[in-house]
Structures are given as structure tokens and as C-alpha cells.
């Protein structure tokens, strides 16, 4: 009987200590920025982000920027494809941030780098529905 109580107590302590969970920490903004290759200019705000990990990894970011910082963000982030006006994103947006109607998007590839051990595919959508504070949506994922 004592052995049964001891075993139950040990399993109870293990369960309360968090050892029963997946152990995977929530992603940080810095981790998401590194994986997506996004370099945000001063005055920008990461509005929302998330990540999914399994066989592949996927990060989604939405960043509000000043209107005059869009070209700098694209250049500093080495986004290589020209944006196509009116082209909708293939990926689903973050639930916290809606996408307006004045949009342009494109896709490119990111080589392995800091925070990204393998090549990643990246899709970027520029939403200028608020011309003074555009929002840049980025999806980056491995396949």
C-alpha cells in the first residue's frame, strides 16, 4: 500500500512540475524575425506573430511600419522579388490582423542563416490600406 502511495505521489509531482508537457517554449519575436529574415526599421511595431513546428517550421508575422520605411524594410530584409499590386497572399493571415484591399505581394527564397538552419520559402504581403502606417505580413516556412 505504501508503495502505491509513493508511486502516486511521485507521478503527481512530475505532472505538476510540467514534465508531462511538450517542453517546447513559445517562440519569441526575435526568433520569428531571425527565421523570416525580416529587419524592422526603428519605429516599426510587430503587431502579431506565431510559429508552428513539426516536420517543417512556419512563422507568421505582421509588422506595422511608417510609410517611408517600407522600401528600407524590403531592402534590409533582402526581399528579392518585386511586389505585384493586387496579388493576394496564398497563406492565411494571423487572426489578430485583418488584410485590407490595397495590397501587393510576392514570394522569394531565404538561404540558411542565423535562426534558420535550412532554406525557407517566404511570402510577403504589403497592405497599404492605411497609407500612413502600412502593415507588412510575412510567412516563412520550410518544406
Image (spheres, grey):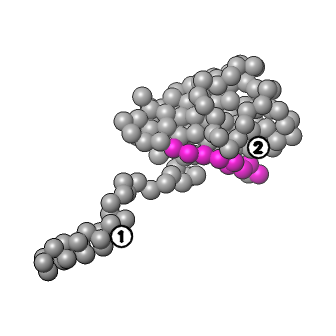
Point out the residue furthest to the bottom here. Answer: 2
Residue 83: within the magenta?
no
Q: Mark 2 points at which residue?
A: 65
Which dot marks residue 119? Answer: none
- Residue 124 is situated, as x and y percent measured from the top left of the image, at 64, 30
Q: Give the structural element (helix, strand or loop) at label 2.
A: loop
- Residue 50 is situated, as x and y percent measured from the top left of the image, at 56, 45
Q: Give the structural element (helix, strand or loop) at label 1.
A: loop
Rendered view: 131 above or below 114: above
**Residue 25 appears left or right of 15:** right
Quadrant position of the C terminus in the picture: top left
Magenta segment, which residues? 43-51
Mark 2 or 1, nearer chain start: 1
**Residue 54 appears left or right of 130:** left
**Residue 2 appears left or right of 112:** left
- The front one of 113 and 48 is 48
Quadrant position of the N terminus in the picture: bottom left
Which dot marks residue 17? Answer: 1
Exactly how many numbered labels are in the figure?
Answer: 2
**Residue 69 appears left or right of 77:** right
Amino acid at each position: 500500500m505504501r508503495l502505491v502511495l509513493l508511486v502516486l505521489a511521485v507521478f503527481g509531482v512530475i505532472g505538476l512540475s510540467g514534465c508531462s508537457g511538450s517542453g517546447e517554449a513559445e517562440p519569441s519575436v526575435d526568433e520569428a524575425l531571425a527565421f523570416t529574415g525580416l529587419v524592422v526599421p526603428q519605429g516599426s511595431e510587430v503587431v502579431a506573430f506565431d510559429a508552428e513546428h513539426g516536420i517543417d517550421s512556419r512563422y507568421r508575422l505582421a509588422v506595422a511600419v511608417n510609410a517611408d520605411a517600407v522600401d528600407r524594410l524590403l531592402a534590409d530584409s533582402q526581399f528579392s522579388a518585386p511586389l505585384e499590386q493586387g496579388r493576394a497572399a496564398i497563406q492565411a493571415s494571423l487572426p489578430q490582423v485583418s488584410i485590407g484591399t490595397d495590397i501587393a505581394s510576392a514570394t522569394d527564397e531565404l538561404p540558411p542563416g542565423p535562426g534558420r538552419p535550412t532554406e525557407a520559402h517566404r511570402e510577403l504581403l504589403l497592405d497599404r490600406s492605411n497609407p500612413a502606417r502600412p502593415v507588412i505580413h510575412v510567412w516563412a516556412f520550410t518544406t
